[in-house]
Image (spheres, rainbow, N blue to C red):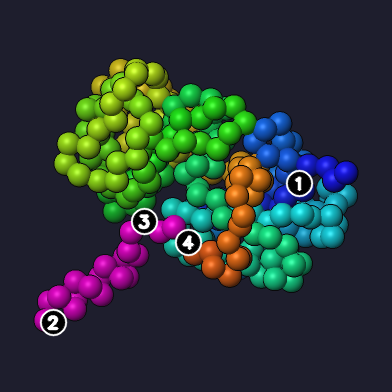
Amino acid sequence: MAGPTLTLALETATSRSSVALTRGSLAGGDVLAEWSLERGRQQQRSLLGTVARLLRQSGADWRDLALLAVSLGPGSFTGLRIGLAAAQGLALALELPLVGVPTLEALACAAAASGDVCCLLDARRGQVYAGCYRLASGQRPQPLLAPRACPPAILASILRQSTPFSPTLPSSAAGERLAGAGRPMLMTGDGAEVYRRQFEDIAVLQWASPLLARPRAAAVGLLGASIQAAAPLAPASSLAPLYLRSSEAEETRHRQEGTAG
């Protein structure tokens, strides 16, 4: 009988990428090894080199792997493209299934095992990538607030109107709120640190350690195995990054086209 799934996970959504080797899922899985690396011009080459060294020093072989997992975003446009391209290339070469993992869900899993968590990544240009989740031990996070890119003030307004919280899936609209039974909510991510002052008046919010502010490949691997166990996976070639907004270059081009028109 086969043991728990051995997963190689890649996380490249922020300036600090990571790779991890995990066994099993959120339900009692283990992190066998995890390495981080700073993003640079040769990120794809260093990423694959780090993966090879991780496997070698863990005593594992490419042939031992059963699953690949990659962080899909939101996050750095360049980082996400590099991570997904590397993962798709490995999936093709090794003939392995590839699962795409939403970055904010992985960030929530890295911050807590249960409870309500709001994840904020600094999206620059005065915005955050945000999503709120309810976690139960060993299970995939349940969305409370659908992921979006927005100014932190808008998110703070939603949270002020939404205490207490309940599982709903609103997407956007003025007056958006989450109503229901009251519970504390943990704030995590580098965006929570950058914009903390805008949320400090909301009494039910608590703050995770800054050490948990970055997405981790270990969480991507364990969550990826849980996603794979729950439903059939799409072909690796069909996966695409979850950007949530246009790039700065695209927005500039649209403004120029609008001016020219």
The quadrant in which residue 3 appears is top right
Look at the image and say whether residue 258 sits in the magenta stretch.
yes
Q: Main secondary structure of the magenta part?
A: helix
Mark-to-mark CA distance, 4 and 1:
24 Å
Q: Which of the two discs, 3 and 2, sits closer to the camera?
A: 3
Looking at the picture, which amino acid does disc 2 mark? Ala
Q: Tell me the crowding category of disc 3: few under 14, some 14 to 19, or many 20 or more residues within 10 angstroms, Cα based.
A: some
Is residue 76 left or right of 217 when viewed as pictured?
left
Kind of residue indicated by mark 3: Leu
Q: Which residue corresponds to the image point at 34% horizontal and 40% vertical from the top-left? A: 169
Q: Secondary structure at mark 4?
A: loop
Q: Quadrant of the N terminus?
A: top right
Select label 2 or label 1 by which is in front.
1
Q: Residue at x 60, y 66 (%)?
A: 235
The answer to which image quadrant residue 243 occupies is: bottom left
> What mark, if any, has residue 244 been given in the picture?
3
Q: From what the image shows, is residue 14 above or below residue 96?
A: above
Q: Does residue 159 appear anywhere in the picture? A: no
Q: Using the rendered view, name the quadrant where residue 173 is placed.
A: top left
Query: How many neighbours does mark 1 have within 10 angstroms: few (below 14), some (14-19), or many (20 or more)?
Result: many
Residue type at the position of mark 4: Pro
State the image coordinates of residue 65 (x, y, percent, origin top left): 79, 55
Residue bearing mark 2: 260
The one nearer the camera, 29 or 192, is 29
Specify start and end residues of the magenta stretch as a single range: 242-261
Q: Which mark is residue 5?
A: 1
Q: Are marks 4 and 1 in contact (CB under 8 Å)?
A: no
Whole-percent x, y for residue 54 in the image: 77, 52
Earlier-in-chain disc, 3 versus 2: 3
* Mark in front: 1 vs 3: 1
Of mark 2 and mark 1, the one earlier in the sequence is 1
Label disc, if present, on residue 241 of the rendered structure: 4
